[in-house]
Image: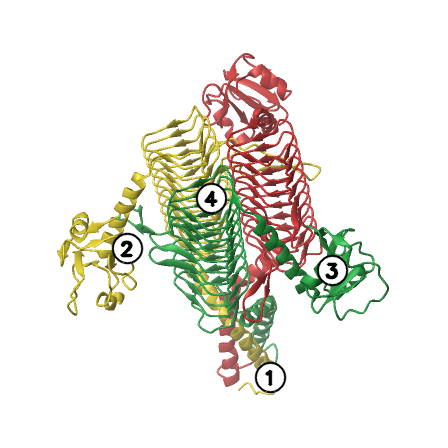
Chain colours: A red, B green, C yellow
Amino acid sequence: MQFTAAQISMLINGKLEGDPNIAVTSFGKIEEATAGQLSFLANPKYEEYLYCTKASVIIINESLVLKQAITNTLVRVPDAYSAFATLLSKYQELVTQQLTGIQEPSYIAKTAQIGKDVFIGAFSHIGEHVQIGEQVKIFPGVVLGNNVRIGDNCILHAGVKIYHDCVIADHVVIHAGTVIGSDGFGFAPQPDGSFKKVPQIGNVVIESYVEIGANTTIDRATMGSTIIRKGAKLDNLVQIAHNVEVGCNTVIAAQTGVSGSTKIGKSVMIGGQTGIAGHITIADGSRINGQSGITKTVKEPNRTLTGSPADDFTRSLRAQAHLRNLPDLEKRVKELEKMVEQLLTGRVNAS
Amino acid sequence: MQFTAAQISMLINGKLEGDPNIAVTSFGKIEEATAGQLSFLANPKYEEYLYCTKASVIIINESLVLKQAITNTLVRVPDAYSAFATLLSKYQELVTQQLTGIQEPSYIAKTAQIGKDVFIGAFSHIGEHVQIGEQVKIFPGVVLGNNVRIGDNCILHAGVKIYHDCVIADHVVIHAGTVIGSDGFGFAPQPDGSFKKVPQIGNVVIESYVEIGANTTIDRATMGSTIIRKGAKLDNLVQIAHNVEVGCNTVIAAQTGVSGSTKIGKSVMIGGQTGIAGHITIADGSRINGQSGITKTVKEPNRTLTGSPADDFTRSLRAQAHLRNLPDLEKRVKELEKMVEQLLTGRVNAS
Amino acid sequence: MQFTAAQISMLINGKLEGDPNIAVTSFGKIEEATAGQLSFLANPKYEEYLYCTKASVIIINESLVLKQAITNTLVRVPDAYSAFATLLSKYQELVTQQLTGIQEPSYIAKTAQIGKDVFIGAFSHIGEHVQIGEQVKIFPGVVLGNNVRIGDNCILHAGVKIYHDCVIADHVVIHAGTVIGSDGFGFAPQPDGSFKKVPQIGNVVIESYVEIGANTTIDRATMGSTIIRKGAKLDNLVQIAHNVEVGCNTVIAAQTGVSGSTKIGKSVMIGGQTGIAGHITIADGSRINGQSGITKTVKEPNRTLTGSPADDFTRSLRAQAHLRNLPDLEKRVKELEKMVEQLLTGRVNAS
């Protein structure tokens, strides 16, 4: 890439101070940037770096009053961080859009339908009757089982595996190594102690604007669908069991596991390494701290939960305080015992 | 697929009521099924759906007395759910059996031996001296290292990686992205603070009828074998360290980790996100609740354990109850202190 | 392989007792070894096996005094285990070194630079401008994004995925299925409840002598680098978030997760399934027990931490002891209440 300060300023609707023709070719943190790089200053804590950075162009807040003159070119905007992020997004979109064509060798079943401007990386395997929308980017080594449907503008990173019959909507991003549609963990105990597999004939449905991290696993439903609703974001190494539903705009941090048939509401935020039991419901807007264990339905919306088994956050903090007082409480009881003993034996006269 | 009600009835040894020639082409939940679908009713809770479902054929319990007439075709059996599962299994077996041949491009070493009716998906890599039994289905992108042996009727889903020298018996299913035989985590501390790798020259042995979920990892033994015994079931994202032995028919839920050289008995059930320390033994029939941490050998069989560090389930519940009483206990001690103080100062006359 | 006892003795600088020409072709545990195998005895607990093992050659400690005559050939060294490990390492290096050449089909961009004696397995995808050093072994199905740099003597096992711009130094081993450089989990909340992706334009830098287990995920930095320092060892299914730094010679056991921007010092040892919060610092030499939850910066080096939220190990043990005493404490308070009641009502005369 190569952009001039003037082009950048125009893209983010900024006010330029300095050389409009100076060009940048990459991005850098303000404290590390070199000549030819674009940077930004959003956090006033880092203002000192503004006066020594080598970045050629720096996006800063409109409101910032310079403490000393600088020779770098500035682009002023109402919110430097947001403008920088917008710029990056536009740039990444541009780069991604340019990625098209089918690398060889790849395996594309004759019955598959591929939309326009699609990229398919080498060693990808597109099964029978697969439908792929427009502007989809499939990185190398992706495997799509029979009848998988992918909407428009999706990005499937290297080595993503999607089992047969799963459905992915538009603008979905799935990171490398993630598995969608593996069999749910269902086995019926037999009289001889062995287990008989319960066939898993449902699928996974992922709605639009969902992003899923790397090496995450989402099991297909026993019957029906495991569903990840619009705008939900799942981190790396997350486990979603069969028949789970994850609500709209819910965010799930890394290594969390959700057991079968549980329904998580909208705009829930779940910290990392949390475990959620099966067949329960989590109310909209719940906040669940990391490493929690949720074993019961959460009915009331917008509560904050913590601990394992989880409890209301404030109640849990209070319990912790009581725990810290426990050694002290033991001492007080010992003291009381001594005094009562003395009272009883009359060594202390109770008057 | 297409089956008539008569064929279905015969396959599951049922009693047909209605049109024997009506055909179904797919499965559906009773509350969602459409015309042309097969469904079942096992749970009496859902009986209401029986009277409005559009499913063409429904498998129901022999004992069910209809509350109103219905026009759908019924197949009555002693246990509707079990019959339905059997039917699905038979159907899936049929579909799987039809999958044969070698997709190109794939890489099969000249010294590999492949049994009959094997399917090998594109981009699979079969190393030197690999032996593959009959009716094995290898989905795209599987990598089998040198000298790997796979028995009969196994299914390896997309992107499974099995390192050299590992041995898989018959009727084993391994889901996408799972890694078998990676090096155990063994490093010897050196005087300078660095670590020297301890070579891991053992292998992994997986006995028959084992099923392993997606993105799970099973490390090879330092020497000897890491062993998963007959009929064990492992969920997604499980970690099995070097030299572990998992007993017959033991079931391990998602995201559980078992540390090195631990031996888990038969018919143990382990909840999700449990951690089990190294070099210990878990007795047959143990029940371990989710998110537990097992740090010591469990000698007595059939106990239920919970918590981290884990304790007997009932003892643990009692401890939780005591914890809940703690604020109350503090109040009682405070009250006692006040009264004893009064007794001592004679403000209350002790008679 | 085939080595004579004399060759083995020379390689590990040992003292040979027995037949120098006897040959071994593989390794075996002393209790399981068969004729033609090499074994070792390090742990005196297993000495009994020395007198019945079928191993042709056994490495033993210099100091061991035989309790009975044996016919197997012995190689005596100061430390049998260490000598055996050295021997294995040398052997594995030898085997690995012999692996060279490029298997077809593979995809190597024309702009990629490949060093000498490199092995590239089939179905590997080497992106534009990738640089690969000498003696690197890339197993089948590896995907290297554009501009990735790999140093010398690295081993990338099957199905490793490294995103664009990441940098791997020398002597790094990465196990199967691991993902390096996936996007950090960064989303800015929007007024309508949805989330806007924060572009992740940094990379991952892995320094030399690092080993990383299977199916682990290391996210790229938002800006700058996520860094794994020299000699660090990461186990399977570990999650390293964006902008984390893992110090020199730090060891992280399986299923541990480290949240964004946290800095872990040197020579830290972290047990499995530990969670570490974001934006904190862990001092050098910290010891963190398995399943801990570290929520605050650890300033003092070399402490041992345990629990969730974590506490000093000794304090935590004490708290556990107090917890165990809790039922007893309740009884004592009840007893006190009875006695004080009696004192107050005068049923017991306080003298």
Q: Are marks 3 and 1 on the same chain?
A: no
| Chain of the residue under the numbered disc 2 shown in the image | C
- In terms of secondary structure, where does tag 2 sit? strand
Furthest toward the right, the residue is B68
For marks 4 and 1, give the one nearer the viewer: 4
| Chain of the residue under the numbered disc 3 shown in the image | B
Please, what is the three-letter code of the amino acid marked with disc 3? Ala
What residue would you read off at disc 2?
Answer: C27
Q: Are marks 2 and 3 on the same chain?
A: no
For marks 4 and 3, give the one nearer the viewer: 3
C258 vs C143, nearest the viewer: C143
Residue B6's label in the rendered image is: 3
Between the C-alphas of marks 2 and 4, the distance is 28 Å
Between the C-alphas of marks 4 and 1, the distance is 71 Å
Q: Are marks 4 and 3 on the same chain?
A: no
Horizontal side of residue B182 vs A335, given as left or right: left
Residue C177's label in the rendered image is: 4
Between the C-alphas of marks 3 and 1, the distance is 83 Å
Please, what is the three-letter code of the amino acid marked with disc 4? Gly
Q: Are marks 2 and 4 on the same chain?
A: yes
